[in-house]
Image (cartoon, rainbow, N blue to C red):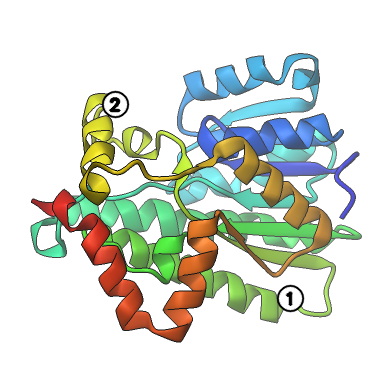
Amino acid sequence: MQISGKVFAVTGGGNGIGREVVLGLVAQGARVAALDLSDEGLAETLRLAGQGGDRVSTHVINITDRKAVAKLPAEIIKEHGQVDGLLNIAGIIQKFVKINELEWDQIERVIDVNLYGTLNTIKAFLPELMKRPEASIVNVSSMGAYAPVPGQSLYGATKAAVAQLSRGLHSELMGTNVAVTGVFPGAIGTNIAQNSGIMTAAEMEAMAAKAGNGAARKTTAASEAGRQIIEAVEKGSYEIFIGSDARIMSRLSRLNPKNAAGLIYKQMKDLLG
């Protein structure tokens, strides 16, 4: 798909990878509807877009609100004239605790945002995307979908569901004008823990220092993740793995899943106390 001249809806556009995708799409001549729960985050994205900001509309939205999401396609088409792509990037992690210690309200919140939020946008936008000469849906899953992380079991389960949803949707749309891409990021340099409302910046730094017995964990820059996602839209890629950690663990998890799980456990077990 050619990016220039197209219109994309991007969830999570107010921070992290979502913001970088918005900025990257605008830089390539696209129009973008940036969706996020944070008004301040969206305002910062718009500021960073600079002169390209006149091709960006911002929409404060809770993607778990199905009725509100259902109204988005009409709003975006009124603003931009069309919608050619949906990039589901918004997502949250859980508290770093075992399932036995995770409260039901926290469980429901993670499922609502990561799974139902993705379903809500797909169901809302797909009818409009199928009308376009060419269209794209991108669903961001996670390395945690195939490589179990202690203390993130529920998060991984929701991202595994997103991965399979994306694959099933791809199969259903074979032979149509809509390409579906699944994205599996590894460790990305974002503030997802803070944005998920599970810890402060200081707590995040302490946790990062503790992980791997104090060894620094290599991360991929959010800007690089955004670049790769946009490239996947251009190519109509089936799935992409962002970061050497995501690629290595994908191979290891396929070859020997038990050993892969053991390796991650050794690196992450100290985070659970």
Q: Is residue 141 visible?
A: no
In this view, 173 is above or below 272: below
- Is disc 1 surrounded by few (<14), some (14 to 19) or many (20+) residues within 10 Å? some
Q: Residue at x 78, y 31 (%)?
A: 26
Q: Amino acid at mark 1?
A: Leu
In this view, 50 is above or below 265: above
Q: Which residue is mark 1?
A: 173
Which structural element holds mark 1? loop
Q: Amino acid at mark 2?
A: Ala
Which structural element holds mark 2? helix
Q: Position of residue 205 (x, y in %)?
A: 27, 31
- Is disc 2 surrounded by few (<14), some (14 to 19) or many (20+) residues within 10 Å? few
Q: Residue at x 82, y 60 (%)?
A: 235
Q: Are marks 1 and 2 in contact (CB under 8 Å)?
A: no
Q: Residue at x 9, y 64 (%)?
A: 100
Q: How many marks?
A: 2
| Among the two numbered marks 1 and 2 on one chain, the one whose residue lies closer to the N terminus | 1
Q: Mark 1, mark 2: which one is toward the viewer? A: 2
Q: Position of residue 52 (x, y in %)?
A: 79, 21
- Quarter residue 9 falls in: top right
Q: Which residue is mark 2?
A: 201
Q: Nearer the viewer, residue 33 or 244?
A: 244
